[in-house]
Image (cartoon, rainbow, N blue to C red):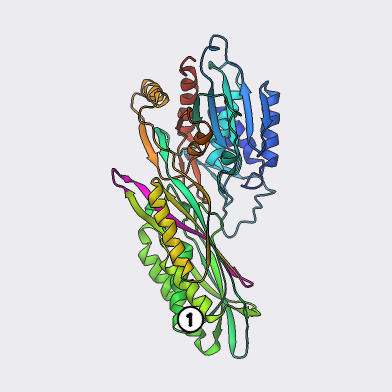
């Protein structure tokens, strides 16, 4: 069986179509044009706005013309993560999906159900002429995963809707009414590389792989290992005992993904090579023991000979850099005092690139409290400034503040209980959602977020729970039937 044969077929068929269109963040032109053509073929108005978002409009069903306009909202881009051995090119290749019992997965890559399932459900609503609903708008934003650029660029007046249904949450049976804000902390430095005297020296590439990684909002509280932090521990020991000299360091590739892998290029005196190998093996054993309950003993740490680099990092720079990465806040900083099971403030040390006289470190700071977010960002500023780096704050956004008296959420909760015989959980999450950003230009819009059950988004282990999709879609249809009158 192929995924397009699963139920509800109209949703899975559309999701399959999306998997055939490359759509990593930063490369959404093809899928945007596909969505506009799809809407127009199905009799809906559609256009691409000034920043690349897709907007669709569908008239009300007969007898529902007096309802307020509802907006279905999702994002078109996906996180491009793959296993080491994969040759997949996210800019060119379709996603290869497979059915694993009650789950849909991808072979060696992220699945793109975040947020392809939300887009597919909105497409199904657009094409089905038999549905009962009031006036509808669909907003499919671009580049949510790399900085919510589509939501930031959405202008006031583009949408007319009063109620917004964000289809980007990841546990069926939950309605999200608030989320954390975020800030990108970008640390940079230039340095003058040293020429290497290769006499009596050997070059090695130390590689870290096999970590689970994960979503830096949803899974930051699970204690998963951060590949950059683990590499820093190894380099701290190796450099401070004069076993090697650092030449390059790379790790992570997405600001909102816990880094799963990375590597460092070092040079080592020949007589110390065995000691360095022993340290690498000691760290591999130690890291797997520390994270056995989370990483399942799968952390790989290897040391292989490589070509001798021409240049190395000056001593003071490498020491200060390693020290700063060792000291920088990473992971959960505080839980919400009044909701202690939800993370309030966290930091994800996401990307490091050190080579050719340049250093860049990217960190995503999150918090549902603006003052705590500022404290976290300033602590990172202080840490990396002491290492001589320039620190800039970019792409900041406030959290989506929950409206516990939302008429939309009250109606959705009642609908869910009637349909499924139990009340949904109404939650605030630590992950970033576009609702708060959209709400800046649409302050009167009532919003809620929900979705099917996904696990391990932003990793090659991303998967979608098949039974949850039908419940999710039927819930959308029933909510649309019950949107209040104007």
- Residue at 41% across, 75% down: 282
Q: Specify start and end residues of the magenta stretch as a single range.
A: 336-357
Image quadrant of residue 121? top right
Q: Is 16 located above or below residue 361 in the figure?
A: above
Q: Which residue occupies 36% across, 65% down?
A: 290
Q: Is residue 85 visible?
A: yes
| 354 sits to left or right of 238 | right
Magenta stretch: includes residue 343: yes
Q: Position of residue 118 (x, y in %)?
A: 54, 34
* Mark 1 burial class by Cα count in 10 Å: few <14, some 14-19, many 20+: many
Q: Quadrant of the N terminus?
A: top right
In the image: residue 329, left or right of residue 125:
left
Tell me if residue 304 comes above or below residue 463 in the rendering.
below
Residue 208 lies, in percent from the top left, at 51, 66
- Residue 84 at x, y percent in the picture: 57, 60
Determine whether the residue tagged by mark 1 lies in a helix, strand or loop: helix
Q: Position of residue 145 (x, y in %)?
A: 55, 46
Q: Residue at x 46, y 17 (%)?
A: 484
Quarter of the rendering containing residue 29: top right
Res. 298 visible in picture:
no
Asked whether residue 300 is drawn in magenta, I would say: no
315 vs 299: above or below: below
Residue bearing the label numbered 1: 276
Look at the magenta stretch and give its main secondary structure: strand
């Amino acid at each position: 069986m192929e995924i397009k044969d699963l139920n509800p077929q109209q949703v899975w068929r559309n999701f399959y179509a999306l998997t055939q269109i490359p759509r990593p963040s930063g490369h959404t032109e093809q899928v945007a044009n596909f969505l506009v053509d799809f809407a127009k073929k199905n009799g809906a108005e559609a256009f691409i706005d000034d920043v690349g978002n897709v907007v669709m409009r569908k008239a009300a069903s007969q007898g529902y013309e007096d309802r307020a306009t509802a907006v279905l909202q999702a994002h078109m881009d996906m996180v491009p993560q793959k296993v080491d051995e994969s040759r997949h090119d996210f800019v060119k290749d379709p996603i290869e999906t497979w059915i694993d019992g009650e789950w849909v997965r991808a072979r060696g890559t992220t699945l793109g159900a975040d947020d392809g399932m939300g887009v597919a459900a909105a497409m199904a609503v657009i094409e089905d002429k038999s549905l009962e609903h009031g006036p509808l708008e669909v907003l499919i934003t671009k580049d949510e995963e790399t900085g919510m650029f589509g939501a930031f660029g959405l202008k006031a007046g583009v949408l007319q809707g009063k109620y917004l249904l964000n289809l980007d949450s990841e546990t069926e049976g939950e309605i999200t009414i608030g989320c954390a804000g975020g800030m990108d902390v970008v640390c940079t430095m230039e340095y003058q590389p040293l020429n290497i005297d290769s006499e009596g020296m050997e070059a090695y590439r130390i590689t870290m792989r096999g970590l689970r990684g994960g979503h830096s909002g949803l899974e930051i509280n699970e204690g998963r290992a951060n590949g950059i932090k683990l590499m820093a521990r190894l380099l701290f020991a190796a450099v401070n005992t004069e076993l090697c000299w650092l030449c390059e360091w790379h790790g992570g590739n997405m600001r909102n993904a816990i880094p799963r892998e990375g590597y460092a290029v070092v040079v080592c005196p020949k007589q110390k090579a065995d000691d360095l190998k022993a340290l690498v093996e000691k760290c591999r054993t130690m890291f797997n023991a520390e994270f056995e309950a989370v990483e399942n003993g799968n952390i790989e740490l290897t040391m292989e000979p490589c070509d001798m680099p021409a240049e190395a990092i000056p001593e003071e720079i490498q020491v200060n850099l390693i020290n700063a990465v060792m000291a920088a806040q990473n992971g959960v900083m505080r839980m919400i005092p009044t909701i202690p099971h939800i993370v309030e403030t966290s930091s994800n040390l996401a990307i490091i690139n050190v080579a050719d006289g340049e250093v860049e470190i990217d960190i995503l700071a999150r918090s549902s409290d603006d003052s705590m977010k500022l404290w976290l960002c300033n602590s990172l500023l202080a840490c990396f400034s002491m290492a001589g780096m320039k620190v800039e704050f970019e792409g900041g956004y406030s959290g989506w503040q929950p409206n516990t008296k939302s008429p939309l959420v009250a109606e959705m909760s009642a609908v869910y209980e009637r349909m499924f015989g139990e009340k949904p959980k109404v939650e605030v999450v630590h992950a970033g959602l576009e609702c708060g950003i959209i709400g800046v230009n649409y302050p009167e819009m009532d919003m809620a977020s929900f979705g099917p059950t996904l696990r391990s988004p932003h990793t090659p282990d991303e998967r979608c729970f098949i039974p949850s999709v039908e419940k999710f879609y039927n819930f959308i249809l029933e909510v649309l039937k019950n949107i209040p009158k104007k």
